[in-house]
Image (cartoon, grey):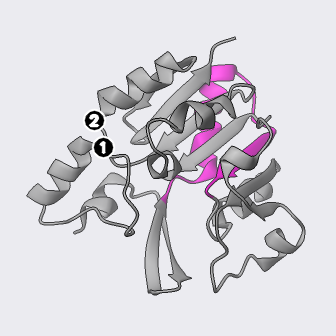
Amino acid sequence: MHYYYTKYPYLNYNYRDTDGWHKMFSIPPEMLATEFEKIFHQPPKSFFDCGAATGVIVRRAQRLGMDAWGIDVKKYPYMDTEELFKSGKIQIKSILDCDPIHADIVYCNGTLTYFTESELPRVLDKFKIAKSLFAIHNTTEDVVAARQNGDELTTCSKPRLIKPREWWMETFNKNGFASKYINSLQCFCAIPQR
């Protein structure tokens, strides 16, 4: 079984990109909402997906009753969520071109690894008025574990910011977030400190 299936068993779905069909691994918004309630003692009302891809997660968050929207830097060639793009609930743009994001939950599924170390503080600044940031992405520990399992963690040809888990925790902390790693979700949770 591929390393991704063991690390992110909660939700996976197929999507088509310009080079063919792939599988996306994600955390369902239901699980993020449960974690949010543990922290803030109230259900989340709004959800922002930074790197929304085909919009599957935005749609699931909407079905939970949240005001959900997102962005991605490109539009995928095949989607059954076209209405999200037509309505403007998902826009094609970079987070660096966005105003600060005001949402209860900000979700980044691998997105932070597509920025350079020098860009990352500007990206994190966009989330400082949000209540919480949940981020999943590969770390150097994942790369080692995947190789031991016979897998390579390559998802695209763009260079990625693959750093140790501790580096990410320190980066969140240096940029004004209290962070922890939630083992049950295999996910970073960063709360802006005001």
On the image, the x and y values in percent for residue 118 come to 48, 35
At a point 13% along the width and 58% down the height, the residue shown is: 147
In the current view of this chain or complex, which residue is farthest to the right?
87
Tell whether 186 sits left or right of 33. Answer: left
Task: Determine whether 154 is above or below 27 in the image.
Answer: below
Q: Earlier in the sequence, mark 2 or mark 1?
A: 1
At a point 74% along the width and 63% down the height, the residue shown is: 59
The segment highlighted magenta reads 26-51
In the picture of the structure, the residue carrying the numbered disc 1 is: 139
Q: Judge by depth and name the residue closer to the eye, 99 or 130.
A: 99
Tags 2 and 1 touching, CB below 8 Å: yes
At a point 63% along the width and 78% down the height, the residue shown is: 76
Tell whether 1 sits left or right of 51. Answer: left
In what quadrant of the picture does the N terminus appear? bottom left
Residue 149 lies in the magenta-colored region: no
On the image, the x and y values in percent for residue 122 come to 61, 33
Task: Determine whether 112 is above or below 150 in the image.
Answer: above
Mark 2: few/some/many CA within 10 Å (<14, 14-19, 20+): some
Name the disc covering residue 164, or none: 2
